[in-house]
Amino acid sequence: MPPRGTTAPPETPPTPSHSSPRRTIWTTRGQPCDENGYDLPEGTPPPPKEPRAPNNYWPFVDEEEFHFADFLFMHEQMSAGNTDILMSLIVAFQMSRYGNADPPFSTSKHMWDTIDSIPLGDVPWEGFKVSYDGDVPDPAPSWMKREYKVWFRNPLHIMEAQIGNPDFAQEIDVAPKRVLGRNKKRQFTDLMSADWAWEQVDQIVAEDPDTHGAMFAPVILGSDKTTVSVGTGQNEYYPLYAALGNTQNHVRRAHRDALTVIGFLAIPKTERDQQDTAQFRKFRRQLFHASLAKILSPLKPWMTKPRVTRCSDGYYRRVHIWTRSLHCRLPEQCLLACVVSGWCPRSLKEAFEGKSKELWEGYGIIDDILPFTSYFPRANIHELLSPDLLHQLIKGTFKDHLVTWVVQWMEMQPNGKGMLICFSNVYHSHIASRIAAAPIFSGLHRFPEGHGFKQWTGNDSKALMKVFLPAINGLVPPAMVHAVQAFLEFCYLVCCSQIDEMRESFHEHGIHEDFLLPCQHSVSHYWQLIQMFGAPNGLCSSITESKHIKAVKEPWCHSNCNEPLGQMLLTNQRLDKLAAFQVELESCGMIQSVRGNPVWSSIALLCIPQVQENSEDVDQEEVEGQTSEGKSSFAVLPMWTLVQLSHFLDIPDFEQHIRRFLYDQLHPDSEVCGMDVDIEECPRISPTMHLKVFHLATAVYHVPSDLSGIGGMHREYIRMTQAWHGGPACYDCIFVEREAEEEGFHALGVAQHNNVTYACAFVKWFETHGDSPCPDTGLWRVKPDFMAHGRRMCSVIHIDSILRAAHLIGVYGDKFIPSHLRYHHSLDAFKLFYVNKFADHHAHEIAY
């Protein structure tokens, strides 16, 4: 049903809105109350927290001791042996210098005991055992005789901790909301902005009017198996995660303790000849659903009766805790929905109740397994499954289907083997050469020798999406290029943080009835799921996969690998205690927030996790802080004179460029720009004047759809140097804001850095090729801009006009490129370039 006081949203597919100003309409629910559940009069301040003594850092002696433990255990993840060595070195140093020793901790056990004494974030681990209780044959298979241990933490206490986390005070929606963009279209952003939250709240109030004003708190669940080692033995784990649905999407995507591991599920193993038996498959499904029902059982009483809970803003509210969505990969979705692998997990079981054969053969539904949602009120597993961008779109559709399709088509052509993407380190394909020739770009994973398509990570698939389209254009039929381009457009649109009701560019031709590939079929449900649950990027399985690093892989690496699960559980509990204690101290003003403390922020940036899918140069990062549209700044380097710099850059008229730039700055309202004015009218400058020269700039801008901090801010580095990391020269291209009244690419210019001076940059310009994007790829094209006498069009521009970095890829056509061409030659080797709007989501939003 539509939100109260509004009209029903039109049944048309949504599309992202590029407008950032928006208006939010809230319901009247989520009313503050007192500790007994009675509503507070409007304007009543929240009850004060229990005061904490200014110097009370117990169980730590002082702030420095807490930071020391936090650094060693959370950031550096130092082993017990190395911690003991460090403490011994501190003692030896202090004894030699001062004649006495007072280390922060005497041993690693002392530090761990101190962390364990933190009273906050203490949700202990519990466990239960499950075993097969059916008829046992003789001889019995091993899986029937085993006991399976499941570990969990009370999800009620976990959710109350998230609801009351003061760090989320501005990022929790206590009631459903309706968000309107600048175009006055409804926007689907966070879970509480979509139809499902409104419908559930209206249904709860209709069934029990006494719950009017209560806060609706859905619990988002996520599960995904992960492997921590390629060695022998037990190396698989099955973590279960939970997050508060009221927390806004960007908080979960920024991994600010908004996603918590609440359990480790059992993974039944058996002999090879038993793995595909009907009994074992049924037991695995029953074990999974029974475990979830047991773990979530503490939530059940509060699904029909609100529980008074203190919230992050300090107020008490009556809270309805609810099981909401599950984000996981397609195999887990089939397991959750009790359908056969490869069938749509959103199929409806109720219409075929009692028709087992028809369900199995016609619809792939398993009717003798009871989903865990059956144990809870108003929960339908087939309605609660969320879209999964990573495995359904990026891996499933792009990597497994489209790339394979292109490769197989080329294999079928004459001499197709010579054009294959390389499957080994011996043969290099034509496409691989094109991919390898793409210029480097901030945050872009490179494929220096092409890439073998047998070993993939999610980051590999995302990276290939950014450069694949220009690489295949000219080598495959235009219809295939159009298909890949249409998918990329859809993928980037659906990954946006805010999606509105506009009709364009979502499904133009619909889905063919006989199109049964599981991942592609799931796309047909997306527009409904977006209207139900909001933007999919807040519910993607990539969030849980990223959490694997902190919750599973790093704790496993720092265990002694002898029965490691118990050590991993304890590590997670200590990490939660340290995080909760830090939030408590920050809220009391006893320590400065890490996001605002340059010392501890620097320490955090130095502690790069060792467990990563691949290692890249750090040329982009999340930025914590308030939201703003964008700015550029530079790092200070030595001084040059104007003459020295002109000789170094080999630009004889460099002085004129400076003078024309100064004319623009001194005459901002002039009808004639500095590039066209007579040089004699420009300010004169001394050839011996000194200029500060910079080889690295930082651009900070708002991009909530990409990797960003809590406010959606993102920092990237713009490089202009003769040697980047000891390698070849790197002169990045940039987007320059030129036409404020235009939108999209029409408002931008593309230029390439040479060097930067004071508050300005020296650039070489590109001009747009044609009046519209390429009809095949949908990408704008640019070419170097030359003046009448054949020299490149250059100018000096103010840094305030630099929006961010731009990624250009050469237009390869149908020609083979030389094998000796390297990526750092690309910007000089081609005459025409694509403006790669698929470099990231922000580029897609501005270069349309």
Image (tube, rainbow, N blue to C red):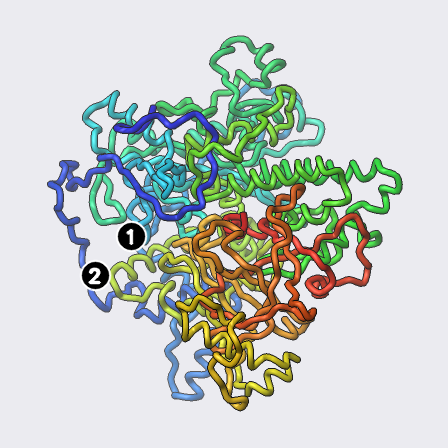
Amino acid type at circle 1 is: Pro
Q: Position of residue 15 (x, y in %)?
A: 47, 37
Looking at numbered disc 2 in the image, what kind of residue is underneath it?
A: Arg
Pointers 1 and 2 in contact (C-beta within 8 Å): no
Visible residue check, residue 802: yes
Along the horizontal axis of the image, is 44 left or right of 179?
A: left
Q: Above or below — where is 400 with respect to 839?
A: above
What's the mark number on residue 2?
none
Q: Nearer the viewer, mark 1 or mark 2?
A: 1
Residue 785 placed where, x, y %?
Answer: 64, 63
* Residue in front for this viewpoint, 20 or 644: 644
Name the residue rendered at 14%, 49% in the picture. Answer: 45
Give the quadrant of residue 695: bottom right
Q: Which residue does the numbered mark 1 point to in the structure image?
A: 166
Measured in 3D between alpha carbons, the distance from the residue under mark 1 to the one under mark 2, in whole angstroms, is 15 Å
On the image, the x and y values in percent for residue 47 come to 15, 49
**Residue found at x 33% / y 29%:** 300
Query: Dot 2: few (<14), some (14–19), or many (≥20) neighbours within 10 Å?
Result: few
Q: Is residue 105 visible?
A: no
Q: Residues within 10 Å of mark 1 (few under 14, many from 20)?
A: some
